[in-house]
Amino acid sequence: MLSILAGLLWIAQAAVVAQALGDMLQGQQVQPAVSAILFALLGALRAVLTYRAETLAQTAADAVISGARRAIVLAEAGRTDDNPFGGAGAVAALAGEKLELLGPFLTRYALARARVMVVPLAILVLAFWQSWAVGAILLVAGPLIPVFMALIGLAAKEASARQMAEIGTLNDFLVERLSALVDIRVLGAGDRVMAGFAAQAGDLRARTMAVLRVAFLSSTVLELFAAIGVAMVAVYVGFSLLGTLAFGTWGAPLSPQAGIFLLLLAPEFFQPLRDLAAAWHDKAAADAVLDEVATFSADAGTPLPGRGARVEPLPGPTSVRLLGCCLPSGMVLPDLTIQPGERVAIVGASGAGKTTVLRLIAGLTLPDQGEVQVADQRLSADTADAWRARLGWMPQAPHFLTGSLRANLTLGRLGDLPAALRTAAVDNVALALPRGLNTRLGETGGGLSGGEARRMTLARAILSAPDVILADEPTADLDAATADLVTKGLLAEATRGATLIVATHDPALAARMDRVVDLGGAG
């Protein structure tokens, strides 16, 4: 509303200028100081309204972008499965740089569209009031701009969509290659990887240039129609004031005041349309981003049960029961009962459901059929957070967050960190790092061997002396000596009294458990 009002104020300014100049041309008495002051006051008011409108629009844009980014981050943080939208690079590109493209749409295009809906119509009414010929010129020239905007906009949206998709693909490509950087260097594949990255970057550059070409083409075409429209009004007004043209008015000849008024209004009639055309590529980019947001939101995935918050541990014994649970493939898992303090190995072929069993026990997902009972209570969204407070989790693939090794091991929790490092037989490794526990490792644990990274995850799992430890393939891909260190660390926690549940292919580790549960072949 403020932007529209600022646009309409030009009509009043034009009337002040037209009246003053018209009176001067007709030799009437003029008070230029009064006209100048009135024009300046209207201009100042217009500037204030424009500034306020743009400030409110920017505030709204920031709120929309931050809200959308927060929704994406919360949705991704609450997922317990892979996102079909894309990898980490694609999601990061959407939440980071792509959402920023909504800003120009909300601050430029939205305001221009609001002005287009009111200001040109008001000027058109005034133009017809003064001269039906000028009104007809504006009426014919004005709609050509939206028509060509719609035609060009189809190409602009398609080009922007291709560009947005390529940005996400390139980010995924970069993340994957960075995560495999050590392997790339060992295999001597650096030149080939660089060539592939250069090819994808070149493709993105070509798509970006395609978007810019459409944007410049649209601006050129629409500026042409606006210039022609203003020129036709100027020609008509000039010849009418010279007396060459005697038509186009409602009986009386066109007065100097009316002619100057129409000349000043003509550019402003096209200005909102030109602003809208200039911001049209902002709309195309925003539409492409919104399509990606819709695609991201279309599949919410399997949400994390509970709120993912830290709460008081769930009271009761550390018993676990799986009753009538099914895998997503439809395979029914055998009923399973694990007593407090028991050491259990879950074995079976790849795809048999070993990891799924651990995820069910950890409350990372709930079964579609059957139920999981923990601490003599049914595991549900209401009890999942409290149950997870009693767990230690050792994933199959070590992963580290951005931050120091100390922050990755503690995750903000209290515990005896030196004792956890000794139990995991990794205390000397931590001391040997360049900055000790303050060393930043990167996501894949750069600076650590595979076995050292695996033992760091064991130290993280046992830091707070959990009541139940879940380990997914804790000795996979490790040499015999390192696997023995990991096994000893796990058994030490079992000796302390923790319930130990491991999913493994390692017969040596399974043999040291109290009981082995065989899930059989792949489901």
Image (spheres, rainbow, N blue to C red):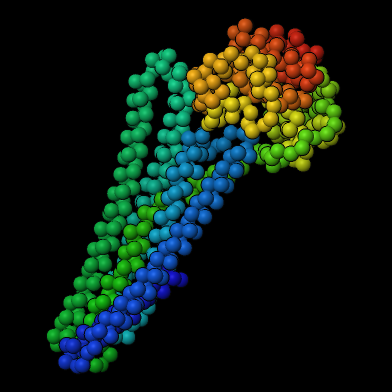
Q: Which residue is most to the top?
A: 480
Q: Total of numbered circles in the picture? A: 0
User: Residue 218, percent across and down?
Assistant: 30, 57
| Residue drawn at point x = 48 percent, y = 58 percent | 59
Residue 45 picture location, percent across and down: 38, 74
Q: Is residue 423 above or below residue 117?
A: above
Q: Is residue 276 above or below residue 129?
A: above
> Relative to 281, is 313 on the left or the right?
right
Query: Residue at point 36% right, 32% down?
Result: 200
Name the spot of residue 43 as percent of width and height, x first.
Answer: 33, 74
Residue 221 placement (x, y as % from top left):
26, 59
Q: Taking 482 as reference, is 143 left or right?
A: left
Quadrant location of residue 334? top right
Looking at the image, is 81 positioned above or below residue 218? above
Q: Locate residue 333: give its quadrant.
A: top right
Residue drawn at (47%, 63%) of the image: 56
Residue at 26 percent of width and 81 percent of height: 36
Q: Quadrant of residue 377?
A: top right
| Residue 105 in view of the camera | yes
In front of the other: 415 or 291 = 415
| 335 displayed left or right of 120 | right
* Whether residue 351 can be seen here: no
User: Is the C terminus in the top left, top right, bottom left or bottom right quadrant?
Assistant: top right
Q: Which of these two is toward me, 316 or 319?
A: 316
